[in-house]
Every structure is written in structure tokens, then in C-alpha cells.
Image: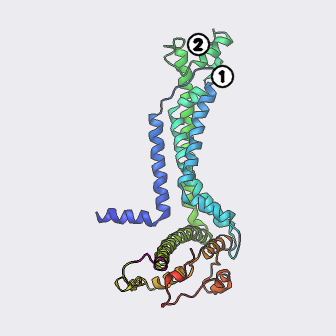
Amino acid sequence: MDRFRALFQHFQSSSESVTNGLCLLLVGLTIKLYSSFDFNCPCLAHYNTLYGLGLLLMPPLALFLCGLLVNRQSVVMVEEWLRPVGHRRKDAGIIRFMCSSVLQRALAAPLVWILLALLDGKCLVCAFSNSVDPEKFLDLANMTPSQVQLFLAKVPCKEDELVRDSPARKAVSRYLRCLSQAIGWSFTLLLIVAAFLARCLRPCFDQTVFLQRRYWSNYVDLEQKLFDETCCEHARDFAHRCVLHFFASMRGELQAWGLRRDPVSLCPEPAEPPEPPEDPEDPDGRCRKTHLRAVCSREQVDSLLSSWYCSKPPLDLTVSPGLWGAGLSHRTPVVTSGTELFQHTDV
């Protein structure tokens, strides 16, 4: 049980592991879809090619788009590519590394569909039955050209009366199926050799650039995730203070209108909720809470979000924050311990 819990926590903490899991799930779904798909070639001269090639190429395109949608890093890559430069320069190498990683995962399911279709052979039999050279098959020599075209169009439909129990139909179907399987196995071998060479030859080259691009691509993903989590934390705290501000202001209005009947002594002034004890394992928690509470109006939040998008902070912690974060310093009030929260909350 502890192993499953540790594995689950690993998948939760690692965005790359989640993406790999979704990729494998999409591959399994692809295999299930192809095995349950009911293939019905129209057996018409002008539609066989369209149906066969469409079934061979259109589902992989849809699976490729699904692979891009389920991969969070694709959105992060586009945002990193289109963002303003600001205080942080763009690195084309990081974007290329992220693009390569996204494409490798997104192409897994489409390649599986294409390989299954080629090894099965039905798509190629349907698509190219009209393109077979009749001279290769002796049983078609006694037919007129129109009869040959009609016969070849009916080859994928083995139950059709025209081609039922016909040796020529079996020969044409066997020929196209063998050709399709040869292409499928050749493509599979090509992919395996390419993956083997990429895996074996990569350690032979300098790994410095690869490690740098991998590190900063992971950084960009984690930074955006942490920013979203921090925004959610601030929104929750900001909403809590706005609600307290509302109840405090309503209490003053009720007193001014004379609607309160209970004496003031029976209902003392609302006090600020006590701060939770500081966690010794998180010494920066109190400092982080102070920074979150310093942004306490809608204008400040909008300006902060605009600054985050337009001018990301430089990747240098030795630089003073005032050099690049002065856009909020003139509007950030100083929160003191003896000041009521609702006095600083602009709603």
C-alpha cells in the first residue's frame, strides 16, 4: 500500500510523469478503438481510395491533436514563445527542446494507429485495389477494361456476388495485404533503429547543452505552476479579507441606522483572526504570507498580473527586486500588526 501511495505522489508531483501516463493511456485507447472499429469499404471505384486513405490518415490526425491537448507543456511552450521579452530574454533552444518533447509524446498514438492499419492491411486493400496492374494477374486477362475496373473495385468486399469465391480476388487482396505488411514492418524497423541510435549515440556527445535545456524547460513549467498555485492562495486569502470587510462595514451601517437592539457589550468588536503558529519546517511561510497580504486591492492585483506577463523577473536572485518590481512599490501599503484588515482592502 505504501508503494502505491508513493507512486501516486510521484505522479502528482511530476508533470512529466503525468504527461507520460496520459500518453500511454492514449496509446491504449488507440489500440482499443482500432480493434473495435468496423471496417466497411464502399467498394465503389471513385470512393475506395478516399475511404481507405481517410481511415489511414484522419484518425491519426485527430489523435495527434488530442496528444497536444492533454500535454500541458504544449501550452507552456506557446506561452514562452509568444510572451514579451521584458526582463528575461528568450532562448530559442529551450523552445525547440520543449517542442521536440511535445511532438514525441503527441506522435505516439498516431504512429500506433498507422502501424496497426498497415499491418492489418485492410486500408491499403481498399485504397489501392483500383490501382493494381491487371497484367500481373492471369485471371483478369479475359475481362474488358470496364469489367476489370468493376472487379478491382469489388475486391475489398469478399461477400459480393461478383467476386465471391474468385481466385483473382484472393490473389489481388493477398498481394496488397503483403505489400501493406511489408511497409508496416519496414516502418516499425525504421522507428526502432532511429530510437536505438538516438539512445546510444547521445552519450557520445557533450551533454552540457542538453542538460541546460532540459533544466530550463522544466523550470518554465514549474514556475508557471507555482505562480498559478500562489495566485489561488492569494485569491482565497483576498476573498476571506473582503468578506470580513463586508461584515465589518455592515455592522457599522446597522449601528448608524439604529437597527441593532443588543447592547454593544454583548457583541464585542470583531478581532482579527489569530495567526497560525509558524511552522518550523517552513521558515519562509510567514514571509510569503506577508508578501501575499501586501497586494490588497484590485488595481494592485491587475498590475501584478500584467507585470508578470509583460516583464517576467530576471533569472538572477542576486538582483534587488526593486530594480524590476518598482511598478507596484508606490502603491503597496505597509501592513502593520495593529491595523484592521478591512482598512486596507479595496472592494
CB contact under 8 Å: marks 2 and 1: no
- Which quarter of the figure is the N terminus placed in? bottom left
Would you say residue 256 sits in the magenta stretch? yes
Of the numbered discs 2 and 1, the one sitting upstream in the chain is: 1
Q: Residue at x 56, y 31 (%)?
A: 123
Instruction: Please tell me whether residue 321 is drawn above or below residue 105 in the rendered image.
Output: below
Residue 344 in picture, x, y percent from top left: 55, 82
Q: CA distance from mark 2 to mark 1?
A: 23 Å
- The residue singled out by tag 2 in the image is 139
Residue receiving disc 1: 46
Residue 268 in the magenta stretch? The answer is no
Quarter containing the C terminus: bottom right
Residue at 64% of width from left, 18% of height from top? Answer: 134
Q: Looking at the picture, which amino acid does disc 2 mark?
A: Asp
Task: Judge left or right: residue 271 versus residue 81.
Answer: left
Q: Is residue 258 above or below residue 181?
A: below
Residue 77 in percent (x, y) is at 62, 62
Q: Is residue 137 visible?
A: no
